[in-house]
Image (cartoon, coloured by chain):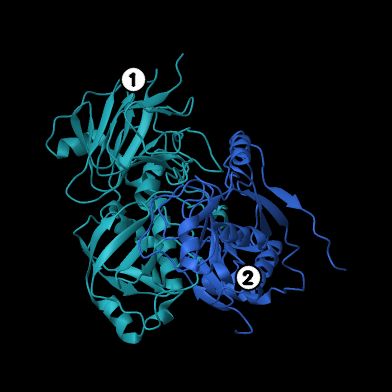
Chain colours: A blue, B cyan
């Protein structure tokens, strides 16, 4: 891993600050720390930033900033320990019962596990939010147990329902909108992780940790109704911080 | 009295409301949206004295037909994509500023080239602002009118008191007639190191044909651009104009509705000064690429923005141009002699 990030142009109006090329919590911490330090520096002309697994994309106004001038500003940033802030922890309700778990049996058969074991493994892990995208409120998660590593489908499956919990390629994903996918659908959350009526429309943040709380079908229906009415059905939990 | 509005009588697929775009939410997976051809979009707004990024209509190859269904006259301006615009069935031209009397019809039909034309209204469209913008994000179902494309029967709210009369004019701005065969400028990166010198040479020397496209991406076909280090990268950020090369070795250029993150190597980015020109290339058209530095692309963008800001000095009296074209002069509008409001 390079000691300093690479600065890579993405056109004349955006710049990529690349910390590495892998999915790695340490890399993602660097992205988060750089993003927070940059927000605090408030460099005029920056429009917004997009943190990803391993890089930060900076969108800027080329009338106010040129690529080279931005890079020299970025080189001056001092990123102290703890610049990334303290991640929040969330509990997200998840239903692993039909009709919300369309591919659970298929995944269990492919991995030589029971459907109950697959659900228990998925719900038993702690995940880190690495990135949002490619559509509103899609949450890309790391931390999937190794027993659940399964490669992507050779062909996309029909659209998954809203809130689908997906796995493929050693990653986990919450799909906030129905969309065809090459991933496998293990369950669904009644939570609406993207709600345009809230500001910001997404409560979760990159670097946050999440766990899934299994709920039955009746609870799913009740929570989805509450979420549709604007209620926040995910829960932030307090974790004791070491001194 | 009824509030000022335009009514959509018919709309082909792809007519949406756009403004400068929705910013600050790309980190949550939202596309910025905004116009496909910002040059024409801004020209239409500036011809009316609007702010450059006020909400306006983007109209696709399906065209549109509207009527001024409000109680007073409405100032409108249209341009881009070489469309033919008609008022009450009479051809006006491809780029003009008009005052639509109550009950007047306005229709756009595509011409021989071009995909998108723009219709701005004095004071800007007053559809609801959602997440900081009026731009339609059809994938997320936000912005515009109920988050979707326009349909017959839609009612477009206008600014109260913004229908102040303007001189009717043709817009004769040279940037509305770009050379569609000139190479599109490209800035390398961020994953140009996934391609060797031979692949890059090929990319910058071979012609590519636009084969399909929508507001999210344009697909190109031509020489196969081989990766030297595979094509699976860990997803990273995506900017407007990104040239992704996926497993099929063909360029896919990400356009206004691009997702903010993606997982294929991006050889380079189309310069923003040229993105509108690419947006107007119909399937079947050929394009070429020329490599430039980020600073060269930036200077080109600033120069084009400065030119577009002078739109008002390219507005010529409508009657004279029509007469020169050998067409009968339209009836003198009660507004054409009133005032001489110089747009900002």
Left or right, B177 with respect to A141, comes to left
**Residue A55 in which image quadrant:** bottom right
Query: In the image, is A217 to the left or to the right of B143?
Result: right
B151 and B281: which is toward the camera: B151
In this rendered view, identify the residue nearer to me: B302 or B57. B57
User: Outermost residue toward the right?
Assistant: A243
Residue A28's tag is 2
Residue sitting at x 44%, y 42% = B136
In which quadrant of the rendered view does residue B44 lie? top left
Subunit of mark 2? A
Q: Position of residue B111 (x, y in %)?
A: 19, 45
Q: Look at 57% across and 70% down and name the residue there.
A: A147
**Image spot of residue B166 (x, y percent):** 37, 31
Alpha carbons under labels 1 and 2: distance apart: 58 Å
Q: Is residue B226 above or below residue B216?
A: below
- Of A140 and A42, nearer the camera is A140
Is label 1 in a helix, a strand or a loop? loop
Residue A55 appears in view:
no
Mark number displayed over residue B102:
1
Residue depth check, mark 1 versus mark 2: number of the one nearer the observer: 2
């Amino acid at each position: 891993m390079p000691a300093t990030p690479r600065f890579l142009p993405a056109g004349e109006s955006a710049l990529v600050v690349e910390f590495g090329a892998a999915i790695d919590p340490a890399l993602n911490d660097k992205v988060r720390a750089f993003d927070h330090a940059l927000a605090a520096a408030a460099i005029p002309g920056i429009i917004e930033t997009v943190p990803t697994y391993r890089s930060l994309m900076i969108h800027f106004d080329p009338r106010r900033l040129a690529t080279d001038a931005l890079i020299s500003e970025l080189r001056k940033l001092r990123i102290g320990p703890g610049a990334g802030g303290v991640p929040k922890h969330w509990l997200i309700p998840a239903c692993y019962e039909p009709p919300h778990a369309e591919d659970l049996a298929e995944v269990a058969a492919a991995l030589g596990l029971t459907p109950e074991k697959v659900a228990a493994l998925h719900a038993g892990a702690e995940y880190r939010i690495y990135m949002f995208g490619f559509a509103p409120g899609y949450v890309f998660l790391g931390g999937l147990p190794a027993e659940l590593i399964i490669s992507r489908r050779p062909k996309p499956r029909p659209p998954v329902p809203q809130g689908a919990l997906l796995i493929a390629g050693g990653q986990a994903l919450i799909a906030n909108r129905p969309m065809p996918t090459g991933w496998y659908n293990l369950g669904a959350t009644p939570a609406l992780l993207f709600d345009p009526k809230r500001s910001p429309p997404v409560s979760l943040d990159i670097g946050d940790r999440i766990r899934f709380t299994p709920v039955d079908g009746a609870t799913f229906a009740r929570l989805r109704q509450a979420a549709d009415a604007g209620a926040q059905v995910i829960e932030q939990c307090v974790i004791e911080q070491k001194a | 009295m009824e509030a000022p509005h335009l009514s959509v009588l018919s709309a082909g697929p792809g007519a949406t409301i756009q403004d400068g775009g929705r910013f600050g939410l790309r980190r949550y997976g939202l596309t910025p949206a905004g116009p496909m051809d910002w040059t024409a979009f801004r020209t239409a707004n500036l011809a009316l004295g609007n702010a450059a990024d006020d909400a306006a209509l983007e109209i696709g190859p399906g065209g549109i037909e509207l009527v001024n269904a409000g109680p007073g006259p409405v100032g409108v301006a249209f341009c881009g994509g070489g469309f033919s615009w008609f008022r009450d069935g009479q051809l006006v031209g491809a780029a003009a500023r008009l005052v639509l009397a109550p009950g007047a019809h306005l229709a756009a039909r595509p011409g021989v080239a071009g995909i998108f034309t723009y219709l701005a209204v004095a004071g800007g469209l007053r559809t609801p602002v959602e997440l900081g913008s009026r731009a339609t994000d059809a994938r997320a179902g936000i912005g515009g009118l109920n988050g979707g494309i326009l349909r017959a029967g839609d009612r477009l709210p206008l600014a109260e008191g913004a229908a102040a009369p303007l001189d009717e004019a043709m817009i004769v701005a040279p940037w509305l007639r770009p050379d569609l065969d000139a190479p599109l400028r490209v800035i390398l990166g961020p994953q140009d190191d996934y391609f060797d010198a031979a692949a890059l040479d090929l990319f910058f020397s071979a012609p590519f044909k636009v084969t399909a496209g929508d507001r999210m991406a344009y697909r190109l076909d031509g020489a196969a651009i081989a990766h030297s280090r595979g094509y699976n990268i860990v997803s990273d950020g995506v900017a407007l104009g990104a040239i992704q090369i996926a497993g099929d070795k063909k360029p896919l250029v990400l356009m206004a509705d691009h997702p903010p993150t993606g997982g294929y190597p991006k050889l380079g980015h189309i310069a923003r000064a040229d993105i509108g020109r690419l947006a107007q290339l119909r399937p079947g058209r050929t394009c070429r690429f020329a490599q430039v530095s980020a600073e060269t692309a930036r200077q080109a963008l600033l120069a084009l923005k400065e030119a577009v800001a002078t739109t008002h000095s390219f507005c010529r009296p409508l009657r004279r141009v029509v007469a020169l074209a050998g067409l009968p002069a339209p009836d003198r509008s009660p507004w054409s002699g009133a005032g001489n409001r110089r747009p900002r």
